Image: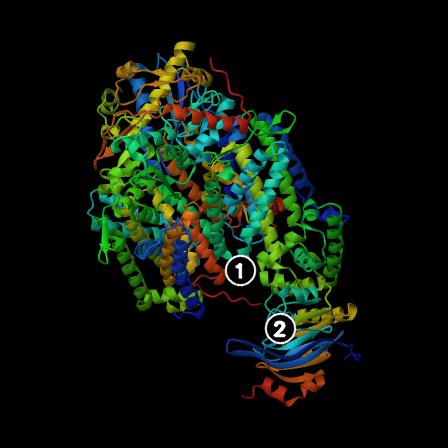
Amino acid sequence: MHERTLGDVVLEVRNISLSFGAMRVLNDISFDVRQGEIRSIIGPNGAGKSSMLNVINGFYHPQEGTITYRGETRHQMKVHKAAEQGIARTFQNIALFKGMTTLDNIMTGRNLKIKSNMLLQAIYWGKAQKEEIEHRKKVEEIIDFLEIQAIRKTPVGRLPYGMQKRVELGRALAAEPDILLLDEPMAGMNVEEKEDMSRFVLDINDEFGTTIILIEHDMGVVMDLSDRVVVLDYGLQLADGPPDEVRSNQAVIDAYLGVSH
Amino acid sequence: MIYREAGEFKASYREDMAILPIRQDRWFMWALMAVAFLVIPSIASEYWLGTIMLPFLILALAALGLNVLTGYAGQLSLGTGGFMATGAFAAYKLATAFPELHIIVVILLAGLITAGVGILFGIPSLRIKGFYLAVATLASQFFLIWMFNKFGWFTNYSSSGVISAPPMTAFGDFFVTGPHATPVAKYLFALTLVVFFAMMTKNLVRSNIGREWMAVRDMDIAAEIIGIKMLPTKLKAFAYSSFLCGIAGALWAFVHTGSVEPLAFDVNRSFQILFMIIIGGLGSIMGAFLGSAFIVLLPILLTNAPHLFGLNIPVDIISHIEFMVFGALILFFLIVEPHGLARLWQITKEKLRLWPFPY
Amino acid sequence: MKLTKMKTTIIAAAVIAGSLAGAATAFAADSQFIGSLVYRTGPYAPGGIPWADGFADYINLLNERDGGINGVRLDLEECDTAYNTDKGVECYERLKNNGATGMPAVMPLSTGITYALLDRVVADKIPLITSGYGRADAADGRIFPYVFVPPATYWGGADIAINYIATQEGGYGKLKGKKIALVYHDSAYGKEPINTLQALADQHGFKLSKFPVPHPGLEQKATWLKIGRQLRPDYVLMWGWGVMNATAIKEAAAVGFPREKFIGVWWSGNDADMIPAGKAAVGYKSLQFNGVGSDFGVHKQIKKELYDKGKGSAKSAGNTGEVAYNRGLQSALILTEALRAAMNQYGNKPVTGEQVAWALDRLSITEERLKEIGADGLFDPIELSCVDHLGKGRAKVTQWDGKQWETISDWIEPNSEMLRAMYEASAAQYAKEKGIMPRPCG
Amino acid sequence: MRIERDVIYIFIATLFLMVAIPWAAGQLSEDIFFEWPFFFEVAIGGLLAGVMYSLVALGFVLIFKASGVFNFAQGAMVLFSALTLVGLNELGLPMWLAVIVTLIVMLVLAIVIERVVLRPLVNQEHIILFMATIGITYFLDGFGQTLWGSEVKILDLGIPSEPGFYFGGAILINDFDLVAALIAGVLVVSLALFFQYTRIGRALRAVADDHQAALSVGIPLKHIWVIVWAVAGIVALVAGIMWGSKLGVQFSLALIALKALPVLILGGFTSVPGAIIGGLIIGAGEKLAEVFIAPLIGGGIEDWFAYMLALAFLVFRPQGLFGEKIIERV
């Protein structure tokens, strides 16, 4: 796989514990993410992977532990703050805006970059129109990149599953994020679609230098793409390290082979 | 075969992002405008202008306002009547306190005041959703009507609590309110405002704010995660929606009836406007107009229908049958196309594009 | 989406377009058109139906018996408003140009519709006759040239009610320190008497307590607990409407407030309001600006000319004595007398609204004329002038005996001097706001 | 049913405020007359009125619970059932037979609504179904009046409406209200038993939780819909009888739906006990407010106060007092 030097730590997760009522979802999780790497979180169903992403982008508030992002340590934050800090994500169960077209969905990804106020938008002339066109250009680049030109004006509710996943990736990319959180981007896809998606993930990482945190079930994909892998199981952190190291970890093998706890 | 986009190519994003990217649609729109501004005023009778077109336009504006809130931003509201009343009473207070103000200024200020009231009553929408919000907005409906009824200040201490529009001109001697305003003048005045605000609304919903509204409507959590702030986005929807409703209310009181009591904007008005946008099509500018036409015109047609066929049916039977037919037609249209008349229109256009081929 | 859907849409559109095209209907050129805005449906239908029947019966009587007025047949068309202002305006606009000369006058039978028509009737030159409702200050004919309010106004009604109470108590001097409550429909209509009552309270030293009831008035328990258990007033007045009336009477019974001390305005005095209240309504009093019962000449003629020939509007001749029915008769009478006067002036052919306004400005329905019609004792004579669009404004007090109304007072005349000043002051304010120059009167 | 802790807190706080605010108003303002017997009279009157609101709200809850439809036509059903009952009675049918025939009519109505309206619109969005029930409302209002006319009709149950004094003559309670509350109470208990102990009742509850699960009970969904609409029709008839004997059977009966809506949001759209508790809180709350707060601001506040009260509860419990908790996930 690609040999490369990793950048500085941009995100540090330290001793995170999260519970809902009596149920402990995450238990003392710690790992870091370096600039420009593809960092994977793996584990069986119910391991707490999605919850971990939700903690990182501020949707869940952990009871214990801190997140340090670009030197800034936080315990809790408002949900929309993550996007402002350059963290974008996709969702395990597609969370697109079903009533809107592909184009509009991706355009919403740029909402933080649009500066015209409501009055200017209402008049739709001069600055507001210029801005709209500028952003449209950016979005068209993303559409070209993801090869979804043909469905530009189709309402996303009518698109097949694989395409919806792509549009969702497009929406996240539109924000030009520093860190991209991908929650099972290849779930339910056939081999061909998976290959396309893997290519997109690598290209995003290469071309835009975007740091990526990836949750994925397909071990082959994970091991091929990732720089480093964290393994969770029932909220516990089993292992953390490069793919090869994780692959040979006994605890991980037990978890995946279903040794009783 | 005539309605075809083949052969039309867009050379710039600007063209592709026009409101009506298809040439035939643009022609149709210009033709419609020509009919609305030139043909109708010259041929329509006073009855048509004053009793059908005027309420149709004004209620369409209110429906447009509600459609922004409910159809685009997904916040179900039954407070429309209250907001219209706010606009009407604000306009009355402004017009009587500052008689030198131009009617456009009065109406715009009334809209802005209503927007403020709308923001206030929009705050609960942060926690309350769906039908719960709809019923909660009834609180604003009942409260506002009660308030205008109760405090004499709003009506300049008139003994009955009725407000009456002073005669005002749009320019020169062109009266648009009061007994000397002709139906044509009223119609043109209302039409101009409605067309202007319909344009503005269209611009908003195709801009960033419109996308934010729709994002909140379709999936509020995802919207928040991509950086859309709930509070300002929802409140902007409430503000703009009430702005339009307020203007509609002011037009209703000043241009349409001339005198109103608060009960003219009671809860039935709120329901009426809601019916319009559901029948017309949620989240569609066109839908607001189609819905308004349906709800305003249909009862009138049904009442008059027996006369046209020369039947002499007692009025109470006509009224009862009108109720039944109206209800049945609502059901019929919902079953034919649950997404409203606007969707029906769209589907017709799509068919037309392919015609005569089935695909 | 199948083609059938499109087809149905197109058909629906065609039907709509087609029915719009032929909206005009032909009318006989030599008959007088009369448009009548009624509400035979909707939440207030129980009170609206007898009125509409009374109005129609009188017009039909003239046609059947006399062949119309001065030989001009009357062509009556009803339009159902369901007491809804939007519909009322639509009715008015639809009917106003019907017939050879248009609608000669409009009687909207609703405060909301009245307000919506105030500007329109001036532009259309069609007199607006509001008998016992609408704007009281329209009694000033200089500012409201096209609005007529005979035979009574709410302000006058309020004064008459206090007058009656004073008589019961033994003179105005005895009112000092008395407690009088007003239960009113919280709307333009219900608020009309407040200023008058307040002025009278200040003048005579009684204490006025106001109890607004929110529309539609299905629930009044709190109001009546306050009245019956806490305030315990000497009298209660009511400006109620529709279902609110019966509910109020029932609640009054429930807190044990004596119905004999409970006086409603005429719109709280329909038979239809008393029936659902049942036994609770016995003893309740109401003002009426017309007589009650069907023991009058005009009723006998209606029975003979219409009901005996199966041409009556009401279910049976037995329904013709209801108060609301008699009110309908009276409205028809005022209108037809004005038409007659206009025809006498302008010739025996259909007359225009402006001509009827001329006639109304000098309308005179004398005791003798009422005798001829067979309505003496049923209605009070009416004399209008250019300045005075009200007349005497008198009313009677009636009491419900469980089956029907009994008249228990003679015509009571309101304090015209005080009221006239109030009408003029209020009308002047309206004129100022609307920029109306008072017209000169003779 | 498990009652959550915050519901109990809210409940206690409400009770406290309902006593404290009138008392304080009485102490602070000259215009407010406060005495304990009078307070209890108002509170009891309010609670009894609240039961009457619950009666209407119950119909909404049944249908919403089982089919997710916000049935705007409930008010029209109240009017229609009462009109039919009285109309049949006037035609000469004895009361008991008229009741049975009306029940059959309501069952037929439920079947027709399921066939004509619900089945073609299955799986549509809530707001579309809501709009459809508005269509039903118009139709029923017109149909009922076409059949039976618009005149007011009397429905006399023979319950006295004269004042009754209780607790040694200190407190006035209306006998009619007591009887009405009693009947409503019996209805609620029998509905609760129906849901708890019959197969159909259990299926209905299952349907509320999960449509798939309901199918596994072995009752087709369309039957369940017919059943709930028919049960809602029965509830409407009872409400129609009670309200009709109070106000006379006339068009205005349809308007009581507006009094039931705040009850509905306060209690939660999906909860039968919620409709009852909600009715009691709204009834007592609005009466107390009208008597002890309204004089300070001009009176006539009952209507909006009920909605504001419900709104205040929603701020603490966005799903209503007993509604199902809304869980958000991504």
Q: Which residue is mark 1?
A: B127
Residue D134 in percent (x, y) is at 43, 47
Q: Are marks 1 and 2 on the same chain?
A: no
Residue D178, compared with residue B254, is above or below; it is below
Image coordinates of residue B88 in percent, x first then y, are 54, 38
- Chain letter for the residue marked with disc 1 in the picture: B
Circles 1 and 2 in contact, beta carbons < 8 Å:
no
Label 2: chain? Answer: A
Q: Say whether residue C238 is visible.
A: yes
Q: Who is closer to the viewer here, B22 or B187?
A: B187
Image side of residue B275 versus residue C287, left or right: right
Colouring used for the render: rainbow
Pick the residue in front: C344 or D227: C344
Q: Which residue is mark 2?
A: A55
Tell whether C275 sits left or right of C422: left
Q: What percent of the width, then of the height, locates residue A151?
A: 67, 57
Q: Is residue A41 above or below residue D118?
A: below
Q: Position of residue A16 (x, y in %)?
A: 62, 79
| Vertical order, D305 against A58 (above or below) | above
- Distance (Cα) linking label 1 and label 2: 22 Å
Question: Could you tell me the amino acid type at mark 1?
Answer: Arg
Residue at the bottom extreme, as displayed: A250
Which label was assigned to residue C27?
none
Q: Tell me if residue C81 comes above or below residue B203 in the rendering.
A: above
> Toward which corner of the image does residue B305 lie, by quadrant?
top left
Residue type at tag 2: Val
Q: Nearer the viewer, residue C424 or A247?
A: C424
Q: Residues within 10 Å of mark 1 (few under 14, many from 20)?
A: some
Q: Count residues near mark 2 (Cα–Cα under 10 Å), then give few for <14, some for 14-19, many for 20+.
A: many
